[in-house]
Amino acid sequence: MPKQIWIFAGILSALFLGAVGFLQVREATRERATALSAAAAATALAEAHSRTNSLLAAELEHLRAQAAELEKQVQQAAADRSSLETQMRSELESRDVTISELQGKLTINILDRVLFDSGEAELKPEGQQVLLKLAQILQQHTNRQVQVIGHTDNVPIHSRTRGGFTDNWSLSAGRATAAVRFLQEQARVEPRRLAAVGLGEFRPIADNATAEGRARNRRIAVVILPEEIVPSDAEPARKEPARGTNSPSLSPPAETPVP
């Protein structure tokens, strides 16, 4: 009996030692796995940081390039505006043609006595020469939209004129359209760049109480818009139609503020 007890005790001791050894081995294995996992995680994190830094560096370089290009475009636009204004003043400015610039819009005011006879909308030879000079400059700045705006004084039209006009509003619209048609058909300005607007007596620049003021108010204003201003309903560019087949339309002044 004692011998069997000793054998049983030995078996239990062996099992206990085996269990302890197994637990020690498992713990050691777990520690090694944990160490390996931590190293792998650290490596993966470092690689992720490296990739993120590379992406951020590339994006920063891209943004810097965009900023440099935008600055270049701004400087070029400013140079173009200055060049356009200088050309207009050199070629056109006179007692009857005045030029002003506001917020990137260049406005050429041409008194009606240069362009039309009283109450009419047929261009005189002198007016045609002014518009030809204007068109020659516009052909060098093909990215600019152009509004041609008719203005009158406040003296009402009491009877139908020879041109069929019965009020100042229709007269101003007819004169603006006549100027636009000449720029398109005779001076070859792209019709998609042009718009005709008639404002009648409602945008005076001088006092209509005097003869001099009324003379200043009877005018055609050619407004050359900044490059970024285009009609809100503009369609994508299409193939240019044959010359003379696309007539300009009378446009309301709602899209862009005018003088």
Image (spheres, rainbow, N blue to C red):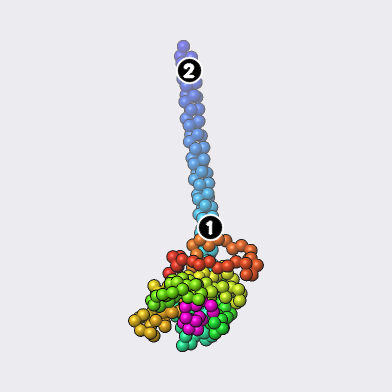
Residue density around tag 2, few if under 14, some if 14–19, many if 20 or more, within 10 Å: few
Q: Residue at x 49, y 85 (%)?
A: 93
Q: How many labels sit on residues? A: 2
User: Observer-nearest residue: 191 or 77?
Assistant: 191
Secondary structure of residue under mark 1:
helix
User: Which image quadrant: the C terminus?
Assistant: bottom left
Question: Percent from the top left, x then y, of residue 71?
Answer: 50, 72
User: Observer-nearest residue: 26 or 154?
Assistant: 154
Q: Amino acid at mark 1?
A: Leu
Q: Residue at x 56, y 81 (%)?
A: 128
Secondary structure of residue under mark 2:
helix
Q: Amino acid at mark 2?
A: Phe
Q: Which residues are magenta?
A: 109-123
Residue density around tag 1, few if under 14, some if 14–19, many if 20 or more, within 10 Å: few
**Label 1 vs label 2, nearer the camera:** 1
Mark 1 = which residue? 55
User: Observer-nearest residue: 137 or 69?
Assistant: 137
Identify the mark at residue 8; answer none if there is no mark. 2
Q: Looking at the image, can residue 114 be seen?
A: yes
Q: Is residue 250 above or below residue 152?
A: above
Identify the mark at residue 232; answer none if there is no mark. none
Question: Percent from the top left, x then y, of residue 150?
Answer: 46, 74
Residue furthest to the front in view is 159
Instruction: Give left or right: position of 45 versus 184.
Output: left
Q: Is residue 202 above or below residue 61?
A: below
Question: Percent from the top left, x then y, of residue 221?
Answer: 47, 77
User: Observer-nearest residue: 256 or 57?
Assistant: 256
